[in-house]
Amino acid sequence: MDETAPQKGTVTQRAIEQIKAMIAGGRLEPGQRLPTERDLAVQLGISRSSMREAIRALTVLGVLEARHGSGIYVTQLEAGDLLETFGVVADLSRGPRLVELLEVRRILESTATALAAARITPDQLAEVEKHLTAMNATDDPEEILAHDLAFHREIAAAAGNETMAAILEGLSSRTFRARVWRGYQEEGAFARTRREHAAIHRALVAHDPEAARAAAAAHVGEVEEWLRAQLGG
Amino acid sequence: MDETAPQKGTVTQRAIEQIKAMIAGGRLEPGQRLPTERDLAVQLGISRSSMREAIRALTVLGVLEARHGSGIYVTQLEAGDLLETFGVVADLSRGPRLVELLEVRRILESTATALAAARITPDQLAEVEKHLTAMNATDDPEEILAHDLAFHREIAAAAGNETMAAILEGLSSRTFRARVWRGYQEEGAFARTRREHAAIHRALVAHDPEAARAAAAAHVGEVEEWLRAQLGG
DNA sequence: CTGACGGTATTGGTCGGACCACCCCCACGG
DNA sequence: CCGTGGGGGTGGTCCGACCAATACCGTCAG
C-alpha cells in the first residue's frame, strides 16, 4: 500500500476535499489567510491550474474568498456565507419543484414568524413597520417587492436563528420571487397581500406566536395554492 | 454605451452567470449536452482555463456534470442534485450554528413525519420497519447510524416532498451525525433513541399526523437540548 | 448480413509558463 | 510627522501542449 497515492477522482476534486478537511479539522480558522495559490499547488503536488479550479469551487460555495492582489481567505463560515448557494436552487427550479420550495418556505416562515412574535424587540418591530408602511405607500412593483422582502427578512432576523433566516433568504431570492410574484400580482392580489401583511404585523405587536404562525402560513399558502393551480390547469 | 463590454467582476464569474442564465432561460434543458469546453470558451470570448473554472464551479453546485471523454451535461436539476452542497454547510458548521441547524431539522423533520403519517403506503411502512428492526438488532454504532439515517430517509421520502427530503438529507450528512452522535450516544442514549423511534413508528402505523409530529419533534429536540447543554458549559 | 473487434478522432483532465491587474507596505521626501 | 510614490507579492487571465477516457466507425470473421 502506497499511502501517498489515494488516486480517487480528479486531482481537483481531491484538492477540494483536502482543503475542506483542513477547515473542518480546525487547521484553518475562519478569516484566516491561506498560502498562495502557487504554494498550495506545490503542497498538494498539483498544478496551479487545478488548484485554482479547487479554489474557485470553494469560493462559489462560500467557503473561501479570494481578494485580488491580497490573498485567499477562509470566510467567517456564517450561515449567510454558506447558504448563499441556496438561491441557485430557487433560481433553477421550475414546475412542481417550485411548489415544493414554497411548501418548505411556508413551514419555516410560519415557525420563524411565531418565534419572532415571542422575541421581537421594539426596535426590530419599528423596522418591520417601516417596510410595511413603505410597501403600502407606493405602486411601483419593484419597490413593493423590495420592501416585501425586507419585511420578511426583518421578521426572520428577529426569530433569532441565523441559519433559518439565511435559508429563507435563499428561498426568497430576487429572481424566484420575481418569477412567481409577477403572475400572482397580475391577478390583483395586492389588496390580499396587504391584508395578510397587516395580520402578521398585528400578531407581532400582540406578541401572539400562534396567531403569527397562522398568519404567516396563510400568507405563503395563498401563493402556494395559486402556483399549484397554475401548474395543474 | 458599448453593450459588448459588461465588465463586471471576473470573466469566470461572468461565464458562470451566463451559463446559469442559459439554463434558467430554457436555452439549456436538463440532461442536455453542452458544447465543448473549447467551443464554449470561444463563444463567450474567454480562455479555456477560465471556462474550465466556471464549469468546475457549476459542477460542484450540482448544475453541470462533466463526463471524461464524453462531454459536459446539464444535470436533471432535481432537488438531490442541487441540494447536495447543503451537506457542506453541516460539515463546516460548529458551535452555536450546529444548534441552529438542529432547530431547522426539528421543524422540517417533525412536519415531514406528520405528512408521512398521513400519506405513507404499506410498502413504504414496511421499509421503515425493516430499518427499525435492523437498528435494534445490532450493537455496532456504525450500523446503527446507517439504519437510523435510512429510517428517517424513508419517512422523509414518504412525505412526498423531494425538496424537503433533500434538505433533511443534507442536515443528516454522515460527518454531521457522526460528530454529534458520538458524544450523545456515549451517554447511554441508545435506549432513549429506541423508545423515540418506536413512538414515531407507532404514529406512522396509526396514521396519526399530530402524534407523529410530536414524536419527531421530541426526538430531534432531545439531541438539540443535549447539544445546547454541551456548548453552554 | 450481423456482430465483435480495433483503431482513431473527439473531449475532458492536467500541466507549465507567461503576462496582466490589483493590493499592500515601506522607504523616501516634504 | 505625514503623504505619497514605487516595488514586490498575489490573484486573474491566457496560451499551448500533452495525457486519458470515451465514442464513433470501418473492418473483418462468422
Image: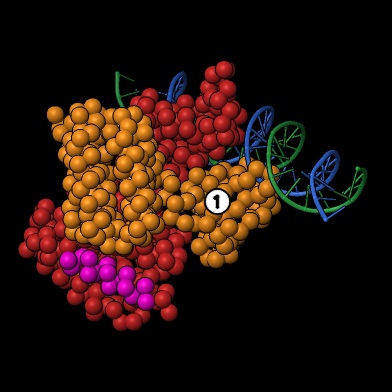
Chain colours: A orange, B red, C green, D blue
Q: Position of residue A187 (x, y in %)?
A: 19, 28
Element class at badge 1: strand
**Residue shown at 17% from the left, 62% from the top:** B213
Q: Position of residue B128 (x, y in %)?
A: 18, 61
Q: Is residue B5 visible?
A: yes
Q: Amino acid at mark 1?
A: Leu
**Residue shown at 53% from the left, 32% from the top:** B14
Quarter of the figure with the N terminus of chain A? bottom right
Of B136 and A218, the residue lying toward us:
A218
Asked if residue B218 is among those painted magenta in the image, a careful observer would answer yes
Q: Examine the residues drawn in magenta and state their main secondary structure.
A: helix
**Residue shown at 42% from the left, 29% from the top:** B21
Left or right of B104 on screen, residue D12: right
Asked if residue A88 is among those painted magenta in the image, a careful observer would answer no
Residue at the farthest bottom position: B188
Residue at mark 1: chain: A
**Residue shown at 46% from the left, 60% from the top:** B92
Q: Which residue is mark 1?
A: A64
Q: Position of residue A198 (x, y in %)?
A: 23, 45
Of B76 and D7, the residue lying toward us:
D7
